[in-house]
Structures are given as C-alpha cells and as structure tokens.
Image (cartoon, coloured by chain):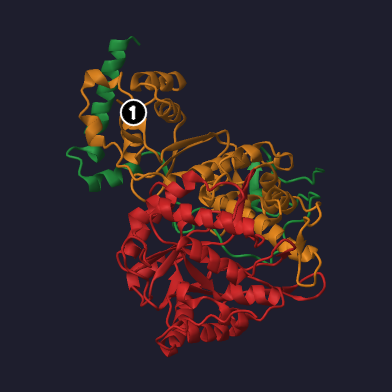
Chain colours: A green, B red, C orange
C-alpha cells in the first residue's frame, strides 16, 4: 500500500467505524462510557478499595525473617492452571 | 507559628480515626461523628486517581491530620529532598490541621526499610534531628509535631533521657510533640520503666495530639515481657488507664485511634473513638504545665 | 551506632546483633533485635502481597513469602511510597528458578504492576472519540498520539487476562492458559479498565504507545493480520482512554 492509498483506507475505515450505530455522532460523554464495552473483552476487577500497598507505622509479632532454606510447596491456584497438557506443579527446588 | 499548619486552625480536641481505604465509601455515605481523620502522607503521594478523590471528599467534611511515616528524620544521611517536596505539595493541596512525623529513621544507603527504627540519644543525634526538623518546617512551611517512639532495644551510647531529648528538639526548633500513649506503655514495659512517671514528666504544654493503639505481647530471650506496637486490636485497658492519667495533665487533646493491621469493620473503630471521647469529656479543662524534674 | 551496620544486620539474619545495642538487663537480646528484622521483612513482603494478590494466590502464601524474601534481598524500596515498590518484581519472577514451571507467572505480575501504576496515575482527561473524528482525513496517517499516563499494554504468550479475571472471585476453577493474550490497561476517569484486545490491535496499540505515527502503527498491524479493522481499533482504543491527546 502506498502512502496515499493507506491514507484513504485509514480515513474510510475510521469513517465507517464512527458511522456505526454505537459510535454515531454527536458523542455525548455518557455514550462514550458505553462505547468501550463494544471493544475487546472487558475484564471485571474487584472494587478498587484494596489498591496496592499502603505504608505502616506499626510493628508485627509475625515471625518471618528466617528460613533461608527454600521449600517450594505448590499450595496455590496454579495447580489448576493447565500449561499445555500438564498442570503447573511446582517441584521442590534446591536453592 | 500556629498549631495548625497553613489553615491556622487546630484539630478539635476530640477522638479521630485513621482513614482506611475500605471504609471510605461508608464514611462518605454516612458522615459519622468523628473529630478528624488522619492519613499516612505517603499513601497520598501518587499523581492522581481514587486516593486523591477520596481525600478531597474527606477533607471537605472533616479536619485532617497528615501523619508522615517515611521521612526518616533520625537518619544519618541527609533528608530526601524529593520526599520533602512531595510533603510540601501535599500540605499545600490539602491544608491539614496538623502535620506530624516520627522520631525514627528508616532509610539507609541501599533503600527504604519500611520500619520506624530507633536511634541513640546523644548530643550528636540531638543536633542532627534538630537540624532535620528545622529543615522540614522550613521546606514544608508548617509547624510539625514530633512523635515519641516505641522501642524494643536500648543503645549503650544513649546519654540523654528520651523526654529531655524530645523537649530539647522542641526547644531548638519550635516544633510541637505528638504524645503516643501506647508507645509510652510499650517502651516502659520493654525497658522496665514506669509509664505513669514518664507521663508525669512529659512537657504537656507542647503536646498537640495524642495517639492510642493496641499492642501485641510476647517475651524476649530472657523471658521478660516484650510489647509490640502492633496497631492490630482494641486499645488495651492499661493504655486507656494511662490515657486517663495523661488527660489529667494535658486536658482535652485531639486523640487518634490507630488501627493499621487486621483493620476491622468501621463501627468497631467508632466504638473505640466513643470510648476515648468519654474520657475526653471527663478531662479537666486546663493543662498542668508543671514538669517534674529528675533529682 | 552506625546505621548502615544496623541496617545490614536487619537484612541478614545470619549476622549477630550489632554492637552498641543493649537492653534494660544490660545485655543485647537477639529476640528484641528480631522484632525489627520481622517488621522490615513482614512489612515489605506484605506490601508485595498487596500489589501482587493474584501472583500470591497462584503460588500460595508460603511460596510467595519465600519469593518475596528473595526479592527483598535483592531490591529494597527506593522511596517511602509503598504502592510503587515492586516495579521490578515481574522481572525478578521471570528469572526465579523455583517458579520456572509457571511460565505465565511473570506476565501476571506485569499486569498487576501496571494496574497499580494506572490506579495512581495523573488525572488527565483522555483524547475523546469526538476529537479523533475531528482530525482532517489527510492528516490521519502522519499524526501521533500521546499515551495517557495510565495506559499500559501487557502482551503475553499466556492467557494472563483470563487468569487475572478468574482470581477476582473466591473460586478459581481449572483453566487452560496456553492462548496468547494482550491486555490493555487504562483509567479514563477513576476506575481502572482492563481489556483483552486482539493480536493485531495489540501490535497497533504498542506502536502508538511507542510514539509511532498512526500510519506506521496501522501498517505494522496490517502486517500481522490483513483483516485488521483500523477504524474499530483506533475508536476502541480511544474510547478506552489510551491516549492523552494528539502529540505535538
């Protein structure tokens, strides 16, 4: 495709996308909100509340600084994930 | 300088609560009767998004106490200029009624350790901390409150009493003090001191805010009681008793209930605030500014 | 007391309690110093768990704690902003030998890292479809779009979007995770949006986010898939909030 053909193709494609019912102008903000649902697969996350890590100024009595010896225990949901015919079992690994 | 930061107002002498993300919707919807909310400054140092939207909504309804946990005021290294600039921006944006930090350090050359670490009380550390508090107040443009620490160890180098150390910093810099009553109990038990005697000697005229929290209990290598400043439970009865004793000297002071780990449903926090408010209501309306000196 | 020596002993439990530390009994006590070791290890590990909850559920709490401990030993936070800790955790996970049987784990971590970044990104109104429609047709191919500060694309050989989605609920069923997926993360207002997009659209989006012109990006996408629907892709990405505006 040369540059001019590409420009025409892009403009035409954009125009037809904009002309479809979902994207019909004028584009009010409330319509914009719905439009993204028509595109891709929308994944629904949990509430944003527990969003990332916060700081602390408190101490803890939990003990978790020892244990340099590595023990790989497949205890999570990875055991239900199928990676090409085998489950993602974690084998104990010497470290 | 005013007790408050740039607004010139102070926090009300009532119970306040730490603002937790999981409670924000409920707080905005129900507008509970809480004296003020306190946030850790660092959690609101992102560029934008929901945290700032929430804090804006809260500060339009309640007084705000901005409590830093990452400035590392006791560090040997210079203060982090980028962090100071972030603090200044936050103070200018939200105009908190109070701004406080800890007598502790948490950064060293390889990075930030995310804990409030202790320092020995010497002439050198006194000069350094005073210089850092000065720099913070100059840069941020607000008077700060410095909080007494909870500690688990002592230093052979320490030659200045903790209260004298805090008072000297306040004297040198004009900063106020945040009296954490739970920290007093934790440190007193951990170092075989009398918590009530500590309160009796504390320079109450400099106290701008009180903190209360729950502690955990364990033992050290010799089987001695070791209290951990865990902020994961209700305020212990002996800490409430020490608080009542404190209020007898300070009169009503803005009082925060800190609960940072295993955060419960909001009504549990409100019940703690109610308990503190009952004690505040019963407190004398004067301050006992006599400071008993050691012999 | 030398704070660097104190910090080194905090981070390495095989080192003795640093000199100068004592107790009311007049002697150093390892259990007391251990409180500080715990506070550092637990608070940093917890911070990683809060930023990477799906990774934590995938491998289980014990494995995650060990992996976090290994990461903390290589990388401490470079600022007190805990929500920014772990930017390099996905790369660490990719090279973490005990997790080699879970090839999708690092990309899952990338998705989670970008989610938090988007959550805290600057509040900037994204380019609107209306503004895009107002662009003169002859200028379209040469135009460049400025990425929105929250926008990020995670491209994976595995079904990381589906893995992430499955872990938002309490029950996680059996899944085949061999399908490549590209996940577009945006935050047009306050809620973070997570969308799986088609492969050609991902090629297109990646090129635009790198700063290539619309024409260059479209050419790359057509190269991947001759049936690439340019109009649908650029309108779709714009409506997700991927762009801040036209680049000057």
- Residue B90, how many percent across, how many down? 39, 53
- The front one of C122 and B87 is B87
Q: Is residue B254 above or below residue C227?
A: below
Determine the residue positioned at 44% across, 33% down: C198
Residue furthest out toward the left: A26
Query: What is the quadrant of the C terminus of chain C in the image?
Result: top left
* Side of C164 where C174 appears, left or right: right
Residue furthest out toward the top: A2
How many numbered circles are shown? 1
Disc 1 element: strand
Which quarter of the figure has residue B156? bottom right
* Side of A4 where C108 appears, left or right: right
Determine the residue positioned at 68% across, 39% down: A85
Look at the image and tell me whether residue C103 can be seen: no
- The front one of C54 and B210 is B210
- Residue C136, how many percent across, how many down? 20, 23
The residue singled out by tag 1 in the image is C145
Query: What is the quadrant of the N terminus of chain C in the image?
Result: bottom right
Which quarter of the figure has residue A75? bottom right
Few, some or many C-alpha atoms within 10 Å of disc 1 (few <14, some 14-19, many ≥20)? many
- Residue B242, how many percent across, how many down? 57, 83
Residue furthest out toward the front: B295
- The front one of B212 and C6 is C6
- Residue C157, how many percent across, how many down? 57, 33
């Amino acid at each position: 495709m040369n540059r001019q053909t590409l420009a025409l193709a892009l403009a035409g494609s954009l125009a037809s996308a904009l002309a479809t019912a979902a994207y019909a102008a004028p584009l009010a903000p409330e319509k914009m909100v719905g439009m993204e649902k028509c595109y891709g697969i929308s994944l629904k996350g949990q509430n944003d509340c527990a969003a990332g890590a916060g700081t602390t100024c408190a101490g803890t009595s939990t003990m978790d600084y020892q244990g340099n010896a590595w023990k790989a225990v497949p205890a999570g949901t990875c055991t239900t994930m199928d990676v090409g015919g085998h489950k993602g079992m974690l084998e104990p690994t010497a470290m | 300088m005013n007790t408050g930061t740039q607004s010139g107002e102070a926090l009300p002498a009532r119970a306040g609560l730490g603002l937790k993300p999981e409670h924000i919707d409920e707080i905005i919807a129900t507008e509970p009767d809480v004296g003020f909310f306190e946030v850790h400054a660092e959690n609101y140092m992102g560029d934008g998004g929901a945290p700032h939207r929430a804090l804006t909504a809260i500060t339009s309804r309640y007084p705000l106490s901005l409590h830093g946990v990452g400035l590392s005021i006791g560090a040997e290294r210079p203060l982090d200029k980028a962090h100071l600039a972030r603090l200044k921006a936050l103070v200018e944006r939200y105009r908190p009624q109070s701004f406080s930090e800890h007598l502790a350090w948490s950064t060293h050359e390889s990075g930030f350790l995310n804990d409030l670490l202790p320092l020995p009380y010497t002439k050198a550390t006194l000069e350094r901390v005073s210089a850092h508090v000065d720099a913070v107040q100059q840069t941020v443009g607000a008077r700060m409150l410095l909080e007494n620490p909870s500690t688990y160890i002592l230093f052979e180098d320490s030659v200045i009493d903790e209260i004298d150390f805090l008072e000297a910093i306040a004297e040198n810099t004009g900063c106020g003090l945040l009296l954490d009553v739970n920290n007093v109990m934790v440190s007193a038990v951990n170092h075989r001191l009398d918590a009530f005697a500590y309160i009796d000697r504390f320079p109450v005229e400099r106290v701008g805010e009180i903190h209360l929290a729950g502690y955990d209990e364990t033992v050290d290598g010799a089987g001695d009681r070791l209290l951990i400043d865990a902020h994961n439970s209700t305020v212990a009865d002996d800490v409430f008793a020490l608080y009542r004793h404190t209020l007898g000297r300070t009169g009503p002071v803005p009082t925060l209930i800190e609960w940072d780990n295993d955060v419960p449903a909001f009504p549990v926090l409100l019940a703690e605030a109610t308990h503190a408010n009952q004690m505040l209501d019963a407190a004398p309306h004067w301050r006992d500014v006599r400071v008993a000196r050691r012999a | 007391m030398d704070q660097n020596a104190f910090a080194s002993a905090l981070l390495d439990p095989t080192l003795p309690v640093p000199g100068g530390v004592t107790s009311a009994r007049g002697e150093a006590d390892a259990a007391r110093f251990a409180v500080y070791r715990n506070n550092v290890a637990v608070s940093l590990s917890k911070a990683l768990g809060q930023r990477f909850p799906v990774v934590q559920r995938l491998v289980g709490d014990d494995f995650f704690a060990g992996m976090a401990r290994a990461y903390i030993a290589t990388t401490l936070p470079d600022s007190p902003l805990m929500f920014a800790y772990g930017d390099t955790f996905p790369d660490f996970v990719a090279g973490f030998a005990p997790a080699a049987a879970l090839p999708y784990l690092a990309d899952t971590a990338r998705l989670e890292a970008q989610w938090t970044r988007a959550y805290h990104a600057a509040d900037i109104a994204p380019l609107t479809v209306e503004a895009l429609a107002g662009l003169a047709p002859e200028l379209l191919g040469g135009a460049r779009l400025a990425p929105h500060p929250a926008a990020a694309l995670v491209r994976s050989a595995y079904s990381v979007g589906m893995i992430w989605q499955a872990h938002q609920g309490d029950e996680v069923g059996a899944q085949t995770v061999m399908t490549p997926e590209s996940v577009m993360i945006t935050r047009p207002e306050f809620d973070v949006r997570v969308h799986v997009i088609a492969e050609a659209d991902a090629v297109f989006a990646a090129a635009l986010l790198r700063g290539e012109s619309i024409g260059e990006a479209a050419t790359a996408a057509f190269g991947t898939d001759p049936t690439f629907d340019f109009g649908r892709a650029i309108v779709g990405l714009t409506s997700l909030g991927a762009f801040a505006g036209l680049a000057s």
